[in-house]
Image (cartoon, coloured by chain):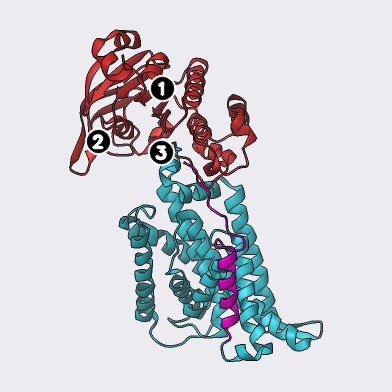
Amino acid sequence: MERFLNFLFIGLGNGAIYAMLGLGLVVIYRSTGLLNFAQGEMAMFTTFIVWSLSDAGLPLWLALIGGMAAGFVIGAVVHQVIVRPVGDPHQKPLAVVIVTIGMFLGFNALAKLIWGNEQQSLGNLFGRGEIDILGTAVAWQKLGALLILAIEAIIFWVIFQRTKIGLAMRSVASNPESSALCGVPVTRILMIGWGLAAALGAVGGTFTAPTSAVDANLMQLPLIFAFAAITLGGFDSFVGAVVGGLLIGILTDVVPRYVDIFEKMPLAPAFLLILVVLLVRPEGIFGQKKVTRV
Amino acid sequence: MALLEVSGLTAGYGIVQVLFGLEFTVDAGEAVVILGANGAGKTTTLRAVSGMISGGGAVSFDCKQVQGSRPEQLLRAGIAHVPQGRGTITDLTVDENLRVGAYSRSGSDVEADIERWYDVFPRLGERKTQHAGSMSGGEQQMLAIARAFMSRPRLVLLDEPSLGLAPLVTREVFDRVAELVRETGTAVLLVEQNANLALAFASRAYVLEAGRIVNAGTSQELRGDESIRKAYLGS
């Protein structure tokens, strides 16, 4: 039991990171209808900014807020300068997706240019302390990640479901032309969407950093898990990103410890589950099926 | 002075020019139709007026030059556009579609307006939490009209509301819009192929052929015009 709880919390802690990245992907998907392949690299880039601020003597929490603010600006600028000029994602989705892949490489190269190839270390937002849960020592950092994840998910759910700007984002994702005819300033709305997603990336990256090291490859594996998480949960669902992320975390960190054949391939259970979900419910567990009549 | 005054309007897509110097006006509270066959340039005309595509010439609304403005700016000025194919925001519910329609407004009377539209189109009220994309064509057309009126416009551009609808449904839509024009004093610029319905609805009409206005007059005059009868009224 103790062993199981230990693995479970490791899984949940990692899953929370996948879910945070997944939330960023969902934000972009719900405001533009696109998958942003650069989400992870943008998160890595903003995490370097957090590291720089923290290295300059700022407390980690303040550094994180600075990184989020920088992320918001970077996201908005990326949309204005790179994504928007390529064209309407509804008319040429592939072109825009390819551009996000280009940005993946661009941010990676830029980070190496600015911060070099050295690995930097970033501390825990919630310190090194542990708490006893049912006889198992659980790091505050893991519980903190879950708490922040919950707060993020609630904030974004409220923004998208309960505010005018959220309604505008969903409207633009569904039909930008009609939205403009209804008076929605489409460009500004998309800028905000990209800004929010990039700001979220700084949080995910700052939680990932202590488990490895801050370098240009920080978010590549987590991004793959985040894609897996939203495939499982549904591209357009915040709840889906959270549940999907946590499930992926648990499956990859817990199951392989108990099932021999997965020991050598810890990723297999998660991808088996995704396969099954895609066969049974292609839109993901919480995803919305698109229904359109003409 | 007319509410909408268009002169020398040209527009097209890329190197293909579609409109060749249109002149027309719409007065406040007036219903005007532009009749034309497929490909005459009806939709392009509305798209150029509402800023969805850029065009040449002069468009003035409420005595202000608005040519070159973006759709959301024109909406704030008071021009709402019901696009061809209804422009349903398919992933949103009926209720949310109406709220997007009210995006340019702020204030508490938005709720009251939404309720009013459920009275005007009871079928929308029955489906308010349903995804708009799952509704029938007629229901989506009603939603598109209600959504446009949610901005409390002074001029509504209506692009072929009869397209793809059963005759009975089309008649219902036209009756409702006619009532709205009478009750709210909103001006309507309609483009249509269905001349019978359109001439009954509008007080004045223009006839568009290959991007040029070839005839104009009151609906009564045009109904009596021999060439119009042959081309558009089928008798």
Query: Which residue position is annotated with label 1?
Result: B188
Of all chains, the one bearing label 1 is B
Q: Is residue B176 left or right of residue B71?
A: right
Give the foreground label among 2 and 1: 1
Q: Is residue A64 visible?
A: no
Q: Residues within 10 Å of mark 1 (few under 14, many from 20)?
A: many
Residue B73 on image: x %, y %: 39, 36
Determine the CA span between mark 2 and mark 3.
Answer: 17 Å
Give the number of the disc on residue A81: none
Residue B80: image quadrant is: top left
Q: Colour of chain A?
A: cyan
Residue type of the residue flagged with mark 3 = Glu
Quadrant of the rendering where the C terminus of chain B is positioned: top left
What residue sits right under mark 3 in the picture? B72
Left or right, residue A60 beside residue A177: right
- Residue range of the region highlighted in magenta in the rendering: A266-294
Label 2 SS: strand
Q: Amino acid at mark 1?
A: Val
- Circle 2 packing at 10 Å, graded few (<14), some (14-19), many (20+), is many
Residue visible at 69% across and 85% down? A7
